[in-house]
């Protein structure tokens, strides 16, 4: 399963929008962070995947002590992506422990459960950042923003 993060707070307030706080402290603290709704979205996605692939299809046994050899989790190093990954794993594998390590870390000992590998460098990774450096996406985004009156 490849997925983006769940619902997040905007990065900054929208001009003339009265629905969001205007104090800069709010945006420094919460701008871009995963919302409670985003956590629920990913936990529900994990539960859906659990039902389909573990319970109905029987593709994996979550009680298998070697489950970490079959389930691989990769995330970028942003708070919202880490939290989305945690919520997804909690939904799909509620009884399996998980741990974190950086993507370039050599594991000296056997970790139990599922390991979430975190991309800590700033290099572009198409799997984790599919919309960056994408001419078609850039064209469509520019077209949408130029025709949207909310962004005038």
Image (cartoon, grey):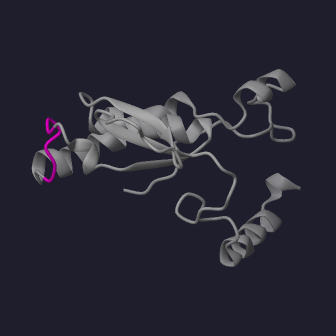
Who's the residue at 67% across and 71% down the image? Answer: 137
Quarter-of-image position of residue 8: top right
Quarter-of-image position of residue 9: top right
User: In front: 39, or 70?
Assistant: 70
Residue that lies at the very extreme toward the front in this rendered image? 108
Who's the residue at 73% across and 34% down the image? Answer: 31
User: In front: 92, or 116?
Assistant: 116
User: In front: 81, or 12?
Assistant: 81
Above or below, comparing residue 28 to residue 15 in the picture: above
Above or below, comparing residue 68 to residue 19 in the picture: below
Q: Is residue 19 left or right of residue 76?
A: right
Q: Is residue 7 visible?
A: no
User: In front: 86, or 22?
Assistant: 86
Query: Would you say residue 47 sits in the magenta stretch?
Result: no
Question: Which image quarter holds the C terminus?
Answer: bottom right
Magenta span of residues: 59-64
Q: Position of residue 37 (x, y in %)?
A: 50, 32
């Amino acid at each position: 399963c490849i997925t983006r993060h769940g619902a997040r707070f905007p990065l900054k307030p929208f001009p003339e929008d009265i629905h969001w706080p205007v104090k800069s402290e709010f945006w420094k603290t919460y701008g871009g962070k995963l919302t409670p709704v985003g956590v629920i979205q990913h936990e529900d996605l994990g539960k859906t995947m659990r039902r389909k692939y573990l319970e109905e299809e029987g593709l994996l046994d979550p009680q298998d002590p070697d489950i970490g050899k079959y389930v691989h989790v990769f995330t970028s190093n942003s708070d919202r992506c880490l939290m989305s990954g945690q919520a997804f794993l909690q939904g799909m594998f509620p009884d399996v422990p998980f741990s974190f390590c950086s993507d370039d870390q050599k594991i000296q000992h056997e970790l139990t459960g599922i390991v979430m590998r975190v991309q800590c460098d700033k290099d572009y990774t198409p799997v984790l950042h599919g919309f960056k450096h994408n001419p078609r996406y850039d064209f469509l985004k520019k077209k949408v923003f130029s025709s949207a009156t909310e962004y005038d």
